[in-house]
Image (cartoon, rainbow, N blue to C red):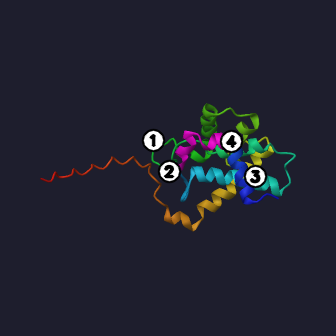
Amino acid sequence: MLTRNDIRALVDHHGREILTHEHMQFERTCFQHGAVTTYAHSIRVACLAVYFADRLHLWHHVDLRSLIRAALLHDYFLYDWHAWDNGTHRLHGFTHGHAALANALKDFHLNAVERDSIANHMFPMTPRPPRYLEGYLITMADKISATRETFSMARFSKPELPKPELPKPPRPQRRMKATQ
């Protein structure tokens, strides 16, 4: 059985291209559930999906790379759905899977398992279930992770998101007085 460190190493290895992408870095600035950012939520879902595959002995039935990549991209909608807008985010729960897929296709090459898992991870809230086992593992991991994040006591102490620091201007040097 895999340890937490083993699982995180697998996610980092198979998800490196995604985790380092500038749009994924943007997800560090958007809250997903409570005090958890979309970036952190996506990593949690990926780790939990790998954990389920391991504990259920599904290694001969699951494409690990596709599982991790789809889990990291399942909420790749690239907007803060809590921010007020013109109403497009009102149905976020029903529509964000397809928004995430459209954005992911712009930035990455995805196989059929990854595309289907991203688009259908909100089942049963959306009518179409995933076609692949990877999609069901992501759906289950997402529901468990979202529930835990939403009902966590930490949600009531939402931290201020870190702002990128601008470089500080050089300090003016003191002039030495000439002594006579």
Q: Is residue 170 visible?
A: yes
Q: Tell me which segment is drawn in magenta.
A: 15-30
> In whole angstroms, how far apart are the C-alphas of marks 4 and 2?
21 Å
Q: Tell me: residue 26, above or below residue 162.
A: above
Q: Is residue 114 left or right of residue 30?
A: right
Q: Nearer the N terminus, badge 4 or badge 3?
A: 3
Looking at marks 1 and 3 on the same chain, the residue that comes earlier in the sequence is marked by 3
- Look at label 2 and name its amino acid: His
Q: Earlier in the sequence, mark 4 or mark 2?
A: 2
Label 2 crowd bin: few (<14), some (14–19), many (20+), radius 10 Å: few
Question: Type of residue at label 1?
Answer: Asn
What x and y, as percent, mark residue 5?
A: 72, 58
142 left or right, relative to 40:
right
Residue visible at 79% across and 57% down in the picture: 2
Which residue is rendered at x = 60% and y = 53% of the image?
40
Residue 82: mark: 2
Are the residues at dot 4 and dot 3 in contact (C-beta closer than 8 Å)?
no
